Image (tube, rainbow, N blue to C red):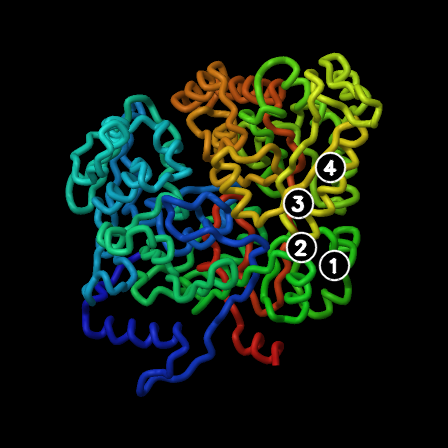
Amino acid sequence: MTSRNPSSPRRRATLKAMAAATLGLPPLAGAQPTRAKVLRYAFPIAETGMDPVQVVDLYSRFLTSNIFEGLYEYDHLARPFLIRPCTAEGPPEVSEDFRTWTVRIRPGIYFQDDPVFKGKPRELIAQDYVYSWKRFFDPRWKSPAFPTLGELKLLGMAALRDAVIKDTKPFDYDADVEGMRALDRHTLRFRFAEPQPRFIQIMTGGDLFGAVAREVVETYGDDITAHPVGTGPFRLAQWRRSSKIVLVKNPSYRDVHYDARPAADDAEGQALLAKFKGRRLPMLDRVEVSVIDEQQPRWLSFLQKQQDFLERLPNEFVNLAIPNNKLAPNLARQGIQMFRTLASDVTITVFNMEDPVVGGYEPAKVALRRALSMASNVDQEIRLERKGQAVPAQSVLMPNTMGYDKAFKGDGHDPARARALLDLYGYLDRDGDGWREQPDGSPLILEISTQPDQASRRLNELQRKDFGAIGIRTEFKQAKWPENLKKARSGNYMVWGVGQSAAAPDGQPSFDMGATIHKGGQNLARFSNKEFDRLYERMQVIPDGAEREQLFFEGKRMLAAYAPYRTGVHRIYTDLAWPWLTGYRRPPYWLAWWAYVDIDAEQQAKAIK
């Protein structure tokens, strides 16, 4: 990668022409008109915003990962993964005890243009990362990702946050903190109280830990989520909340070219490298994202060529589109491409451990949750609702991550054992109406949060049947996904079904779901156990190896025993694309792939006439 100075007259003229093209303006005098390369596709769930500090959901992170940049990034074609510099100039310098990490930032990287900068190029500097990461510690932003940085024990940062909480004073962003310091304009140093052998994975990717400019945040204030200004390949051009998002090529993006290191025996990766190597990134001019939360309209929109790409073929159309897991002949004749991947994800039913009905740590409450887990017929869910597009999950650990072991077994489907467990702990049908009451005789009704789409409704019916088979009534409370997430993070719910995706190759972030420090964030169950926390903290500081693998096993066994989550499935994703979209390959962890795909605009235009 190389950088060019955007302040030169020739460069400014080029940037103006690029800006005109990406915004659909008439070409400048002397320029040859070209058809814009536009990727169109639909999110099945609405975004929540575009401030890295405030987002946690997958679809918002798709947006922030293409607008902001971390110090490092994942190689687009390497499998299972390869980390390489992004805004960093090279690999980090790491002390032998893994307590000090020093990173040199590449000079000549600039933020996208914004009125805040008053027409002047704004270079990315080390202090921008210091400021950006400090924001996670500022209670004002209520960052769901704060625990991820908080648990690293960056020297001085806990005291800085505590001073705000205790004294109710504004967060002091100018305080000199030993844990995060800009040594000079382009050198950044992190220091920790304990070893952090996998810290480079935190520094990788811009979806959460990308750099923002302080003056941008201070200008837009609480509206910063609608004004994302990063150094990445795209910038926000239009946003209608929960409806449509348009990102356009960032005219001030530096000179970056397609390069990757697929394995020698990776035929697909080698073919993509041969096709695109040396192409300037991003290859697209614009990305138009619609939000279509009903599966049938999203499917029809793709078939009608209103979308170029269909992420995650809806299960109800599997038999039509990919019978026997092969592309249907009528779709193949049209040149549609199919991409199938065992996802690094897990579906879970979350029990609020602070709820008076399903929460708690006493044996009767544990028995109730485990009985509900044993009542769940995951194999039937895979066969009937998911049309075979999943494999059973035995723990919260996800495929393709360290610590995942498909040989590990949790509670399986066993309704007879579930009924016996409920009988033993006093969950009995006292009035003969066919439904169990709580041990104290009060009603036992599960209130399950859900979404108002057809796929959710079908899963709800399977849950109703499974739980009804052991004598437990259910009521479903519908709300949009972002509303359910907000309630879950605040603990204002009883039961909710949700999916989690891996953002890094290490499996420990899956255990965020059980760590006390992550309550209100990834720990939606609000589970808290001192023994689990000690295990979690030990995993954080030791290198990979046999001891850490044993801790993964013990942690999985502990979560299975207390059952704050009922694990469901690991999904198999099938993505479809029209032939004019090229270069796509689903990443196992990261989300920033838009810069690496291309659109044949002429072929696209002919097809959608």
Viewer-nearest of discs 2 and 4 = 4
Question: Of label 1 and label 2, which has the lower sequence position?
Answer: 2
For label 4, the residue is 463
Label 3–label 2 contact, CB within 8 A: no
Of marks 1 and 4, which one's residue comes earlier in the chain?
A: 1
Three-letter amino acid code at the position of disc 4:
Gln
Image location of residue 280, percent across then percent down: 39, 64
For the question of whether residue 100 can be seen, the reply is no
The Cα atoms of the two marked residues, 1 and 2, are separated by: 8 Å
* Place of residue 540 in the rendered image (x, y in percent of width and height, measured from the top left): 41, 24
**Badge 3 or badge 2: first in the primary sequence:** 2
Residue 415 seen from this side: yes
- Comparing labels 1 and 4, the label whose residue is closer to the camera: 4
**Of circles 3 and 2, which is in front?**
2
Residue designated by label 1: 321
Whether residue 120 sits left or right of residue 457 in the image: it is: left
Dot 1: element = helix
Q: Which residue in the structure is indicated by mark 3?
A: 572
Q: Nearer the viewer, residue 254 or 424?
A: 424
What separation in Å lies between label 4 and label 3 (alpha carbons)? 21 Å
Question: Which label number is shown at residue 226?
Answer: none
Bin the neighbour count of mark 1 within 10 Å (Cα to Cα): few under 14, some 14-19, many 20 and up: many
Residue at 71% x, 42% y is 460
- Are there few (<14), some (14-19), or many (20+) residues within 10 Å of tag 4? some
Q: Amino acid at mark 3?
A: Ile
Callout 1 amino acid: Ala
In three-dimensional space, the C-alpha distance between marks 1 and 4, rounded to whole angstroms, equals 27 Å
Question: Which tag, 4 or 3, sits closer to the chain's start?
Answer: 4
How dense is the environment of label 2, judged by Cα within 10 Å: few (below 14), some, or many (20 and up)?
A: many
Q: Are marks 1 and 3 in contact (CB under 8 Å)?
A: no
